[in-house]
Structure formats: C-alpha cells, structure tokens
Amino acid sequence: MSGNTLSALVSQDSLFLAPMAGVTDSPFRALCAGQGADFTVTEMISAKGVLLCPREREEVTWLKAVSEGERAFLQIFGSDPAFMGEMAARCSDGPYVGIDINMGCPAPKIVSGGDGCALMRTPELAVRVAESVVRQSRLPVSVKMRLGWKGDERRFLQLGQALEAAGVQMLTLHARTREQMYAGHSDWDAIGELAQAVRIPVIGNGDVKSGEDAEKMLRETGCRGVMVGRAAMGDPFVFMRLRAHLQGKPCEPVPVRRRLATALAQAQALAEQKGETLAVREMRKHMAWYTKGLRGSAQMRVRLNTALHIEDFETALRELCRENEP
C-alpha cells in the first residue's frame, strides 16, 4: 500500500463531488474540479465485471480520463474479496489519489447481488473485502457507506471502527439508511458520532445544498470534509459558492450565458470521449438540470430531450439564452 496517507492529503473543510452513476463522468468531474471541488469520485464500476471481461471495457478507458489538477478517487464495488483486491491492484497505477469501496449504493440491482449497501448487512464480509483491497492496493483506500440497511440495523459505528482497523484511511458517511434511499432527512448527528469514534478522516454526505449547509455540517459534526451529490447536478458552480462561503468571501451569481455555455462545453467534451450519439443521449438529463428554472425551459426541454446532435443542443441553448438575458 502507498505510504501516502489520506489524513495528510485531505485538509480541513475539503469539498468532495459524490460518485453518481450516469452523472460523474470525466467531463463533469473536470468541471466540478475547475469550480473548486478538492476531490472527485468516479462513477462506481464492478470489479467482477472488469476482471471477467477478456479485454478492457470502454467504461474503464473512460474512467482513466482524469483532468489536469483533478484529484479523483476510483470507486469500485463488489462483495468478493478476491475480485475486489485484484481490481485494486490492477488500478493502483491509474491516475487516482485513492481507491474508494462502495458500501452505500442502495440501488436494487446492486444490493440484490450482495454489493453496495448490502455489505453492511454482512459486516464480517465487508471487513474482508476492505482487508483484501487495502492489502493489494498501492493507493490509499477509503469507504463510502450509509447508516445501515434500515433504522434498526444502524451499523455504521461498529463497521467504521472495524474498517479503520482493517487499514481503511477515510470514511464517507451518507447519513441515511438504505431503506430511506434519498428521501427524508440525513442524520448529521450520526456523522458527528462517527467522527468521534475513529481517528481517520470522516467526510459528511447528505443534504448539503448551500454554503450555510456546509459550514453547519462541518461545525456541528467535526467531520473533515463535505461531499456534495445531487446539489451539483447541472450546477458545478455549487463548489465555487461553497468555497466562497467557507472563506467568508462574496460570490456573484453565475450569469445564464455562462451556465448554458458550460452545459454545451460538457456535451462537446463528452462527444469527444464517447462519440456524438452516446454523448447526446447521456447529456439530455444534464440539460434538464442546467436549464431548470429558466424562463421557457419547460417548453425547451422537449427539444433538448429529443436532440440528436450537439448542434441541436447549441441551437436550443442559444435561444434559451436570448430569452433569459437582455
């Protein structure tokens, strides 16, 4: 394992972009890093899926795209210690600052195979997975988890301490149970409990939408950093606002023109990476997020959702910009 420690790398008040399937591809991560995200996390990738494939899958090639200055964690998922360890070994020479183990994904197709948050129901196996990854990785290892499976199975404290003992160097806690999915309120008190129970950095995740939220989480929980997920969708500028608030500096609203130009730039970068057809299909949801709340956006989203070419996005965004800026 690398001699570098996450405790030294992750400074106080660090800002993280959360891993989100279908969202945190390399062009979007680059935008967030450019706006002030100290760390990013890739979309999760199946260790078993990669290792059983006879040749390197395109998804792996895409994940290896890390922008200059971006500090990215590669997030892997799986419940087989051997596969997870081998995946960590194979990817330790990639352009990442660490390997992150997914123990928090609540998606049915993930937990049905015993992966993601389902690992929290089998803590002994979860620890074996972590031990295998730590042993074979040449990069520092972190884990992202939830409170537990449901309200009466909140195992985050015991598991967090066991993961620290296994050599994991950082824990991120999405302070909801699997049963909650993304509904209800996250339990920030639990983040504070975990931060007190372990010596390694704890990153808080859940319900941070503004600079005030980030400041409050850091102050009330004692966590090392804050991870932002849904608030960043269609708004990479959220990191600029969070950083400005934490530093006590003013932050001017982003003009509509810049917001829409950023959306187009993301689409163009994705097309260079994945080809225009796939990029347009994947960018449709991003366009809905970028244009939310703008005058005429509801009608324009019909066009954006049926776009076939980057040029279609460009034309629609130009019209939307004229309607919203003098």
Image: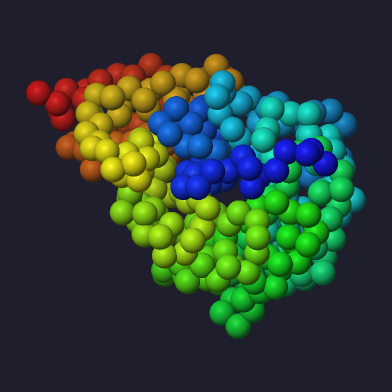
Relative to 133, residue 39 above or below: above
Q: In x, y percent, where is residue 210?
A: 32, 50
| Residue 197 sits in quarter | bottom right
Total numbered labels: 0
Q: Is residue 82 left or right of residue 14?
A: right
Q: Is residue 13 left or right of residue 293?
A: right
Q: Is residue 58 visible?
A: no
Relative to 182, residue 256 above or below: above
Q: Nearer the viewer, residue 13 or 293?
A: 13
Q: Nearer the viewer, residue 78 or 223?
A: 223
Q: In x, y percent, where is residue 272?
A: 55, 17
Q: Is residue 272 visible?
A: yes
Relative to 48, residue 63 above or below: above
- The quadrant in which the N terminus is found is top right
Rendered residue at 79%/34% (across/down): 92
Q: How is the image coloured?
A: rainbow
Rendered residue at 46%/59% (across/down): 206
Rendered residue at 37%/40% (across/down): 243
Rendered residue at 17%/37% (across/down): 295
| Residue 127 sits in quarter | bottom right
Q: Is residue 57 left or right of residue 148?
A: right
Q: In x, y percent, where is residue 194?
A: 59, 67
Q: Residue furthest bottom?
A: 152
Relative to 162, residue 97 above or below: above
Q: Nearer the viewer, residue 313 or 155?
A: 155
Q: In x, y percent, where is residue 38?
A: 51, 37
Q: Is residue 209 left or right of residue 13?
A: left
| Residue 290 sits in quarter | top left
- The quadrant in which the C terminus is found is top left
